[in-house]
Amino acid sequence: MAQAQSDQQLDQLIGRLHELFADERESDAQKRLMSELDRHMHASDSDDVADPRPIETLEAMLGEYEEEHPQVSAVLSQIVNALKNMGV
C-alpha cells in the first residue's frame, strides 16, 4: 500500500514537471531530466537494471535548474525526497 502511494506521488510530481515545461520550448536540459526520470521510473517497475545512483544523478541536476527554473527545482527536490523515503 505504501509503495503504491509513493509511486502515485512520484507520478503526480513528474506530471507537475510536464506541466511546468508545457509552455516552453523544450531545452536539452529538460529533455535530459525527463529522460532520467523516465529511466528511473521504468527501471523500478521492471527487471531492467536501474542506475545505481538515481538520487545522486537527480541531485546533481538540481543545481542546473535552481536559478533559471526555481519551480522545476522545487518539484525535482520533492521527487528526490520521495525517492529517498522509498529507500531508493
Image (cartoon, rainbow, N blue to C red):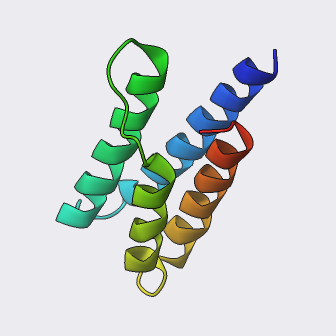
- Residue sitting at x 48%, y 24%: 44
- Name the residue at the right extreme: 1
Q: Does the rendering let one see residue 7?
A: yes
Q: Quadrant of residue 68?
A: bottom left
- Residue sitting at x 59%, y 59%: 75
28 lies left or right of 4: left
Q: Does the rendering let one see residue 27?
A: no
- Name the residue at the front extreme: 52
**Picture mark count:** 0
- Residue sitting at x 62%, y 43%: 83
- Name the residue at the bottom extreme: 67
10 lies left or right of 18: right
Asked whether 48 or 1 is in front, the reply is: 48
Give how far across and how far down residue 1 sits, in percent.
Answer: 81, 14
Give above or below for 75 relative to 44: below
- Residue sitting at x 68%, y 54%: 81
Give how far across and how far down residue 27 sits, in percent.
Answer: 21, 65
Asked whether 47 or 18 is in front, the reply is: 47
12 lies left or right of 62: right
Asked whether 30 or 47 is in front, the reply is: 47
Looking at the figure, which quarter contains the C terminus?
top right
Give above or below for 3 relative to 31: above
Give above or below for 77 relative to 82: below
Give how far across and how far down residue 78 sits, in percent.
Answer: 66, 56
